[in-house]
Structures are given as structure tokens and as C-alpha cells.
Amino acid sequence: MKATLTVDKAYRLGSIDERIYGSFIEHLGRAVYTGIFEPEHDTADEQGFRKDIMALIRRLNIPLIRYPGGNFVSGYRWTDGIGPKENRPVRLDYAWKCTEPNQFGIDEFADWCKKAGTDGMIAVNLGTGTPQGAADLVEYCNHPSGTYWSDLRIANGHREPHNFKTWCLGNEMDGPWQTCAKTAEEYGRIANEAAKMMKWVDPSIEVVACGSSSMEMPTFPEWDRKVLELSYDNVDFLSMHRYYGFRGNVNDFLASYVDLDRFLQAGIAAADYVKAYKRSNKTIKISLDEWNTWYNTYDVNPQQIWTVAPPIHEQIYNVMDALTVGGLLCTILNHADRVKMGCIAQLVNCLAICMTEPNKGAFAQTTYYPFMHASLYGRGEALRSVMDAPKIATKHGDVDAIASAVTLDEENGILTVFAMNMGDTDAEFTVNTHDFGKLVAKEHIVLDGELTACNTFEQPENVLPHEGKLPIVEGEKATVILGKYSWNVLRFAV
Ligand code: AHR
């Protein structure tokens, strides 16, 4: 097959907010305990943080990590996780039917973030929690000193504020599975009041209101409209979540990038409806703060209910997942004008791009690589591009056989094309650029292989990206072969 992508230097979509390359660590299964925190591990530092997984995470250059949930946060008392560890209570976690020992809390997370070279995006509890509890947490984390909560942080060993700048107003509050789920009216009111109070404490923060937890919710997209109508002036982002399952049809799954495009368009439309209704000049940004593929996983094993950190949702990802994730990253980049935050869910062990074994090693899943490529190279500006490719019939309709996105890093003079060939044949792919001058092909990175191939503890490097043939460049045109079922990163000096 043949395909052409046309790119014009003048057609800018918007600057890429680096926070689209965020991730997520929830108190869920083994994400925290035996994931990032395992004091008995050979590589643990003086705070019990595993250095092996830290090294894998640092390679990703992740700007933001959402914490501590997820469903977990809706029953979480953040005060349980501060102060001397021997005094911290052990609690039941209703969300995942586990026991939470509270040996890792907000202060440990702040320290861990510093070591990992990232920043926290903190979710407050608006399930069982209150706006006052949320404002207190902002005060504990961000207020310099001289008040009850800020002085308590100092007494707990943190003279400098944590200064978390991004805050989620609860999690998936429309979902019946959520501890203290709410109607749109109930949630919109409490989110608005919490946002006001949190911003009184620290006016520099940005806050994210829960949108619909998926497109399948019967209340979608009315929930989004109602919540924003009640909170528009005080919130900055609308949260959206989307996971994709493989249900036996490869084309349907690989074409998830088209579904995500529709979902994002719907969220943007709901936000802009409220903008028009309010006659507002303010534009709500989108925080896609949970996205990934998710299937073939299990909740807590009934034998392990109410235990500490049992394995839950430990999906092993294969090449097909990596391709799907690559397609989803293209869609996120193609909405860079409105999607200003995103979190691949999650980072360690649960639905994760990296895995650890208690007392043993860590490895990067197949999905780690497209995420890393986008995070490292997809910076700067997103460009609008036009794809001319054969179509593939899927449950999402007839879709382009190649998903793509284009970014321009003007500072370093690099044009990057991300392309996922979901076809079962190789593609002769031409990038036809305008106004860039002569292109110089620098690099072609490929991830491909048997669709079911994956990395495991036994074979951690079974699937790795490799160098592909460089494109043949003629002036402003470059032609290259994209192998069947492959993820490709083409980098040009411009
Ligand atoms: O990421 C796993 C779970 O998925 C999160 O806790 C929840 O927000 C979503 O339903």
C-alpha cells in the first residue's frame, strides 16, 4: 500500500503542553507497595524507594504523575499518611478491597517525585471527603509556614512546601463503583466549592473537574455539561478517562485511535457548549488523566481480600497493545490545542508500562516504548497534517490504515513524524512537507514483531525498538517503508 502525509510549516495546531506525557500511580494492588516502595528491596534507598524502577521511570522524562487515585482516593483520609510511621492507622480500602498500611503518603510521594525528576498531580477526596479536607491538603502541601497544617508539614520534616500545582477534584464521581458517587448536581456543587477554597489557599494552582468516566456512561455527556455549568469559573480542566479492550478483532483494537478522537471531540464540545451558554471568554482545557488499553486482568483474588498490596490488574502488554498505545498518542498530539494534560494509566504494576517483582527485578513493557518516544521527541508544537492512506474497515468505521502525528521542535530544528501502520502489509509512506527547506533524515525508530509478543521477567528484552531504514529524501519529500503492524518514529533535521 502507499500513503502520503502532507505537512505545512505554517499549519500549527498548538504548542504541546509537556504534561500530556503524564502518568499515574494509585494506591492500587502493587503500584506503591512492592512497586515504587519496598524498603526490603536490594535497590531500596534510605526512604525505601526502589532504585531499579526509579531508573526505568527517569528514562521517560515524565513531567507529571497523578496520585493517590483513582478510585482509591474517594475513601482516602490523607491525614492517615503523614507523621511518624508507627502512628499511622491501617485502614480498609473500599475501592480495591485491600488493606492500606499508610506507610507511604503525601510527604513520601513528594520526596519520591523529586528523586524521579517529576511533579505530582494530586487528587483530593470528594467522595467521603469534604471541601475543607481538600483545602487543608493544599495548605499542608503548598502553604509556606505559620499555620496549623503548614507547620505540621514542617514538623514532619518538610520545611519547604511541596508546591504541587495541579489538583484533581475527586475521581470518576459519576461511577456507581465510586465510594460516595454523586449526581452531576451534587458533584458540580461540591467541586465548585472545593475549587474555590483550594484556590483561596493557593491561587497559583490549577484544578481539574471530573468529566464522565467513560463514553458508555448513560449520563455522558450531560454530566459534563451540568458539572461545568456549576463550576465553570473556578475550574481549569475537564477530566476524561478512556480505556480500550481487545475483544478478538485486531483491526477494531488498533483503530482505537479513531474512537479516542471522537471521545475527545465530545468532551471539547460539551465544554464549549457551556462556554457559549455562559458567554465566557474562558476556555476549559482537557485533562485525559487516565488512558490506556485494559483487558484480561483481574480484581483482587477472593483469597487475598483485605490483604496489603495483592496483585491486581497486572496486565502484560504485547506488541498489539504497544501499537494501539502509539495510535492513541497520535490522537492526543492531534488535539494538542485542547488536551493539555494526559496520564497513561498506570505507571507501575497495575495496567502499567513498567513492572516489578517483589525482592526481584523490574522491566519495561512493550507499551513503555511508544510512550517514551512520544515523551522524548514529541515536544514543541503539534502541526496539522493531512493523511491520504487506504482505509481499513473497523467497528469505528473505515479508518486510515496509518495513524500519525507531526511535531516540530523549533529550538533544536527537529521535525518528528509518529506513524503507526495498522495494516497487515508494508506501506510505502511519503512525508510531503512544505516550507521546511531540504529535510535531512536523522533517525527512524521502529517497534514491531509478532502481535502477541511481550516482555516478561524471564525475557525482559523480548520486544525492543530498533533502527529502521532511513527515509530517502528528495528536497522536501521523504519516502520510507513502514512495516506491517509497526510503530515508527521518523526524525528530520529542518
Ligand atoms: O486505573 C484504574 C482505575 O480505573 C482507576 O482507579 C479509576 O479511576 C478507573 O476506573
Image (cartoon, rainbow, N blue to C red):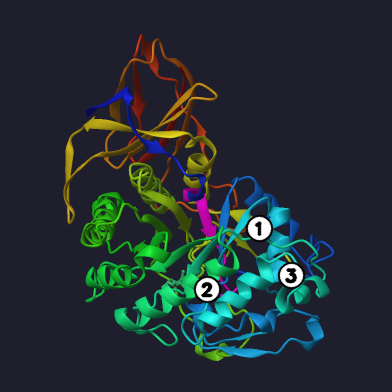
The answer to whether residue 297 is left or right of residue 56 is left
Q: Position of residue 27 (x, y in %)?
A: 58, 74
Q: Classify 31 as above or below 442.
A: below
Q: Amino acid at mark 3?
A: Glu
Pair 1/2: label in front: 2
Pair 3/1: label in front: 3
The answer to whether residue 162 is left or right of residue 84 is left
Residue at x 27%, y 58% (from the top left corner): 275
Residue at x 47%, y 77% (from the top left corner): 71
Mark 1 secondary-structure assignment: strand
In this rendered view, identify the residue nearer to me: 172 or 305: 172
The answer to whether residue 50 is left or right of residue 95 is right
Label 3 residue near ligand 1, CB within 8 Å: no
| Residue at mark 3 | 38
Cα–Cα gap, marks 3 and 2: 36 Å
Mark 2 secondary-structure assignment: helix
Q: Amino acid at mark 1?
A: Ala
| Residue at mark 2 | 197
**What residue span does the magenta drawing correspond to?**
20-30
Mark 3 secondary-structure assignment: loop
Report the disc number at residue 362. 1
313 drawn magenta: no
Quadrant in which residue 65 is drawn: bottom right
Q: Residues within 10 Å of mark 3 (few under 14, many from 20)?
A: many
